[in-house]
Image: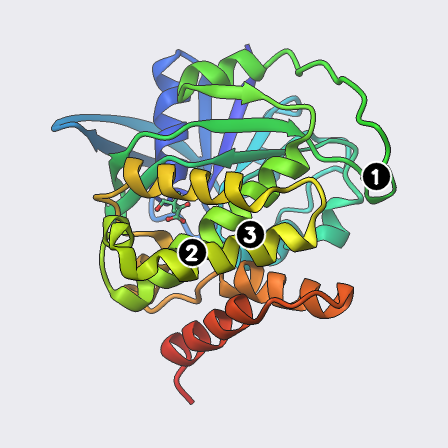
Amino acid sequence: MANWVVVGTGALGTLWALGLQRAQHTVQIYARQAEGANITLSRTYDQTTESATFPVIQSASEAPADAVWLIIVKAWQLEPLLTDLQLPRRQPVIISHNGMGAADAMLSEFVSVYDLVTTHGAWRQSRTHSLHAGLGQSWFGLRHAKEQEDETLRTIPAPPWFSDLAAALPPLHWCDDIELKRWEKLAINCAINPLATLANGVNGVLRDEIYAPKLRAICEEIANLNPKLDADQLLTQVREVIRNTAGNYCSMLQDKHAKRPTEIDFLNGFVCREGERKNVATRTNCELAEQITALTCPQ
Ligand code: KPL
C-alpha cells in the first residue's frame, strides 16, 4: 500500500482522492494556499453523495518520502506548481491534465513520470464538491523519453501501487503506449471542448448533425499529424465520449464561466503549432484556437 499525495482538488482530483481514501489508503492533499489543516471533499454520482476529510500539506517536505504524487491540475498550472514543489527527481509523479506540451522540459528531469488519461466527465459544483456527471475510463502508463518515441515500445510492468489507483476509480487500464492514448484524448478534447464552449452548452449538444463536419475535420487534421492515429477511429471515440458525458459541462466551458485561463493553448493551439512545425494543414484547429482565445481573453 502506497502513501498518496493528491495535488489539485478540481472535479477530477476530488474523484481520485475520494476513491483512494475509500480503498483505505493514506491520502494527503497538497494545497499551497490551504485555509485549514484538513479539507472535506465530496462527490455526487447518480444522486448518491459521498464525502471524506483529508489532511492538508502545504509543502512537499510534509509528505512521506515514499509518497506517490498524483498531480491533477490544469495544463497551464503544471510548470509553476513543479517549480514550487521542488520534488526530488527520483519521486514517482503521475500527471493528468488535458492537452500536450505542459512542462515537458521539467518533467524530462524526473526518473519516472506516469501519465493518467481519463474520459470521466465531472464538474465542480462548488470549491469542494464534484458532480460526477459521466462515467468514463482511464489509461495509465509510463511516459517515454522523447528519443524512445519512435522505437518499438517495450512492455513495461505496472508499478506495485497501480492496483491502488485502479481500485480508486475503475476502469483503469495499464497501457504500454500511453503517448498514443494522450493523442487520442487530445483529439477528444480538441473536438469537444472548444465546440461545446462556443455553443455554451453541455457536451450532448454536439450530437446535433450541424457539428458533424467540424468534428470530422478536427479528427482528420490530428490524425494527419501522427501516423499511429486513424481519423475514423478518433471520430468514433469522440462520439462515444459525447454520448457518455452528454450531461457534462466540459472543463473549458467551466473555466470560461469561472474566468480562469483555458487549456486551449495545450489543445487546438498545440495542434496548430504542430501543424506549422510538420507542415501539415490544421486550419480547423487553428481557427478554433483563435475563436476561443478571442472569447476568453477579450482585448
Ligand atoms: O475531458 C473532458 C473535459 O471536459 O475536459 C471531457 C472528457 C470532454 C468531459 O467533459
**C-alpha separation, residue under disc 3 versus residue under disc 2:** 17 Å
Residue 196 in sight from this viewpoint: no
**C-alpha separation, residue under disc 3 versus residue under disc 1:** 20 Å
Residue 267 in sight from this viewpoint: yes
The residue where tag 3 is placed is: 99
SS at mark 1 in the image: loop
The residue where tag 2 is placed is: 215
- The disc label shown at residue 150, or none: 1
71 vs 252, nearest the viewer: 252
Q: Closer to the N terminus: mark 3 or mark 1?
A: 3
Q: Residue at x 53, y 66 (%)?
A: 285
SS at mark 3 in the image: loop
Q: Residue at x 61, y 62 (%)?
A: 270
Q: Closer to the N terminus: mark 3 or mark 2?
A: 3
Marks 1 and 2: which is nearer the front?
Answer: 2
Q: Position of residue 203 (x, y in %)?
A: 28, 50
Q: Closer to the N terminus: mark 1 or mark 2?
A: 1
Q: Residues within 10 Å of mark 1 (few under 14, many from 20)?
A: few
The correct choice, above or below, for 143 with respect to 222 in the image is: above
Quadrant where the C terminus sits is bottom left
